[in-house]
Every structure is written in structure tokens, then in C-alpha cells.
Amino acid sequence: MFEADSVKITVLVENWVDMLLEDQHSDHGEHCVRNGLIEHFDQGRIPPQAENGLSILVTAKRGIHTKTILFDAGLTGTVLLHNLRALRIGVEDIDGVVISHGHPDHFGGILPLLDIFDRTMPVMTHPDAFLPRFAVMADGRVSQYYNQGFTAESLERHGGRPILNNGALDLGCGIYTTGFIPRTVSFEGPQPPAHDHAPGLYQVAANGHYGLDEVLDEQGLVINVKGKGLIVITGCAHAGVLNTIDRAREMFGERPILAAIGGFHLGFPTTPEANVDRTLQGMLERDVKRVVPMHCSGLRTHVRFSLDAPEQYIQPSVGTVMSF
């Protein structure tokens, strides 16, 4: 499989902005640069914004070639496009977009983004991402068919070219989608509701059955870095961040894991607190060099990882740039 000589990962949309974070460097050569105090105080710039969503720009280089992939599009086009301007990032070099799964905090900004391109843009996602989804709250409120604006037809109307896949895709320069992520870690993945219509996320399957949203459409990114190892990027890790890491190793063999970056799905009210400890232990057992919990990972995860794995933990923020 092809490898990247170098990789730059830029956080475009994330749940928080923190202008006081320091740059971080390591003996392994990678570094993490922040959008910090000086940019916020510079009257010639606009500060980035946070929202409950995720979008990560990945640029990989191999020899004279470069590939740039946008992974997820945040919750709204308003924040995604604002942050592109704030961070002074042009879209002319984006080669394609990967939508990790069909939840709006990951696809929400895709249509406004497509509108600004002057060319057709490949949009890669699983065909099940378009199936109708419902959310049932503990107080009885229901959000029915909340992903109805995300369809193959809507992508095409706005200049997208849907590429629907359930297997791994080679995107170039060492960047790959995971395809379907097997659920083998016992405590990861959506758990069956306690009873019919219990609070949770539901989906209408292709056969018309209404039941638990198992988020079988979810996929992540893997970047294969020459002589170093693998970078694993998750959207929400409904399938489990450890399962996603294991899927990456299934694809590439027992290579070192340079970083696990993205939503870890540990911040939900229904997620057992013990899963935070189990996930941390699983990261340490897999010898993950850098751990960057984002978006839906939750405060408990940040506290535990920062205290118990300070050498591995990186606190994310909109505008963070990680280079490997």
C-alpha cells in the first residue's frame, strides 16, 4: 500500500476554541501548532468559531504529489465556511470529501461547502448514510427523519459526485477510508435499548424495519506514514475508537499507531463512565503515541486522559494543526 512522506491535519470544526493553548513538540518529530492569542488579538483577522460538530482537513504528501481530503463538514455551513476564512484556508486544493456517517454534526455543512466549488467534488460515504434516522429524547420528544436533507440527489444538485462505498477506498498519497468497521471490542458500539421507544437513536433500515441506529454506515480515515506508522481519524466512533484502530491494523498489519484523532463517543449521557477507563486502557495496550479526543468524547475523557496519559494526550481546539 502507498505511504505518505508527511501529513498535515488541520481542525476546522470542533466543540471548542481555546486561544491559550501552547504549541507542542516531541522527540519523534511531529508537532502541534495552535491558533492562539496573537491571532485572536490581531485586528486584521477574524477569530474561529466552535460548534457541536467535526471537520478535519488532511493533507498528505508523497514525493512531488499532494492529496487533500476534507473529513466531515461540521454541523453548519455557517461555521465551516467562517473557519475556512478565519484560518485563511482556500478550498482550491481540496480533492474530495469523506462523510463519516449520516448524522448532521458531520454532514451539516456539506451543501454550502459544495456551492463554493467551481468544479464537481467527489463526496464519499456509505450508502446507508441516507437511510431515515430518528432521535428519541428521555422527556418524550422525538426528532423524526432529521437527516432528510442529506441525500445523493441533494449532493448532485449542489455539485457533488456521490461515491457510495462499504469497503476501503484508496484516496491517494497514503490516505484510505476504513470502510465497514467490525465491532469486536465487547463494550464498544451501540447497545440495544432497554425497551421499545427507549431514549436513543433509531433508523429505518433498507428493508423498512425501524430499530436501533447501529450506525453501520460509519467509517474513518487511516493515513499510512512512511517509516512511522498509522494515523487513525474517527468521526464519532459509534463503532468504537478501539475497533477503528483494530480495523486500521487489519488493513495495514501491526504497524505503530502514531495518533488516534476525532470523536470517541464517550461523552453521551447513556455511555457508562467505566467505558472511559476501558478506552484509555485499550489505547495504552495498543501503544497509541498521540491521543486527541474531540467532539463527542466528553469532559470525563479529557480529564482522565490528561491526568493518566499526559505524554499521549493532546487537547484539541479549532485551528489546531498537527504535522507528522
Image (cartoon, grey):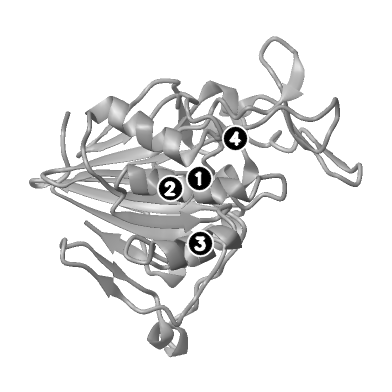
Q: Please tell me whether mark 2 sits on a helix, a strand or a loop.
A: helix
Q: Amino acid at mark 3?
A: Arg
- Residue, disc 4: 102
- Residue, disc 3: 304
Q: Report crowding for label 2: few under 14, some 14 to 19, many 20 or more residues within 10 A (C-alpha).
A: some
Query: In the picture, which quadrant includes the N terminus?
Result: top left
Residue 236 at x, y = what percent? Answer: 54, 44
- Residue, disc 2: 281
Query: In the picture, which quadrant includes the C terminus?
Result: bottom left
Q: Report crowding for label 3: few under 14, some 14 to 19, many 20 or more residues within 10 A (C-alpha).
A: some
Q: Amino acid at mark 2?
A: Gln
Precedes in sequence: disc 3 or disc 1: 1
Which one is closest to the eye, mark 2 or mark 4?
2
Task: Check contact, mark 1 vs mark 2: CB within 8 A.
Answer: yes
Precedes in sequence: disc 3 or disc 4: 4
| Residue sticking out furthest to the top | 207
